[in-house]
Image (tube, helix red, strand yellow):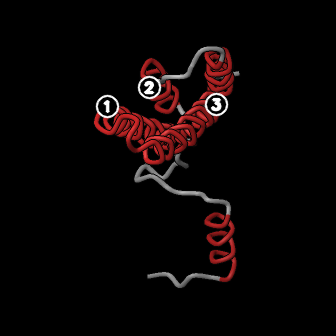
Amino acid sequence: MPKATDKDITNRRSFLATGGTVTSAGSLTDPVYLAIDDHRTAAATYQALERLFDDAHAKLGENHNHVVNQLGLECDEAINWAQQATRDLVGTTPTTLPGILAMLEYLPNVEFLDGDLRTASASISDALRSLAPA
């Protein structure tokens, strides 16, 4: 097995320091996958808290306002996180054809999209332009 040189270690450290990851195919991972995963997590958290809030409100009613109010605040934070994750997702330019396809397949499932659809479209257009042969 060849011995690693200082140059190899420096390049590897630089690569890892910038957050780089390598897929089994040896190409850099498309940032859109992380944006999709972040959005999926934020949306699931919001949906779970919203169900919990609705259940608590229905079962506890006015008797436990502090509990219902606290859950309401948690829901507000979760919806803000989900909305930011949506903005981050649509602002992410895919860097690979599979990434573009993943984004196109995921976008119809995204809540809170409204005006952000234009941004997503621009990100996808940028990605397609960068991948097109000159």
Between discs 2 and 1, the one toward the N terminus: 1
| Amino acid type, residue under disc 3 in the picture | Arg
Quadrant in the rendering for residue 106: top left
Q: Which residue is mark 3?
A: 87
Mark 3 or mark 2: which is in front?
3
Report the Cα–Cα distance between label 2 and label 1. 33 Å
Location of the C terminus (image quadrant): top right
| Amino acid type, residue under disc 1 in the picture | Ala
| Amino acid type, residue under disc 2 in the picture | Tyr
Look at the image and tell me whether residue 32 can be seen. no
Between discs 1 and 3, the one toward the N terminus: 1
- Disc 2 packing (10 Å; few <14; some 14–19; many ≥20): few
- Going by the image, does 79 lie left or right of 116? left
Q: Which residue is mark 1?
A: 58
Report the Cα–Cα distance between label 3 and label 2. 14 Å
- Disc 1 packing (10 Å; few <14; some 14–19; many ≥20): few
Q: Position of residue 87 (x, y in %)?
A: 64, 31
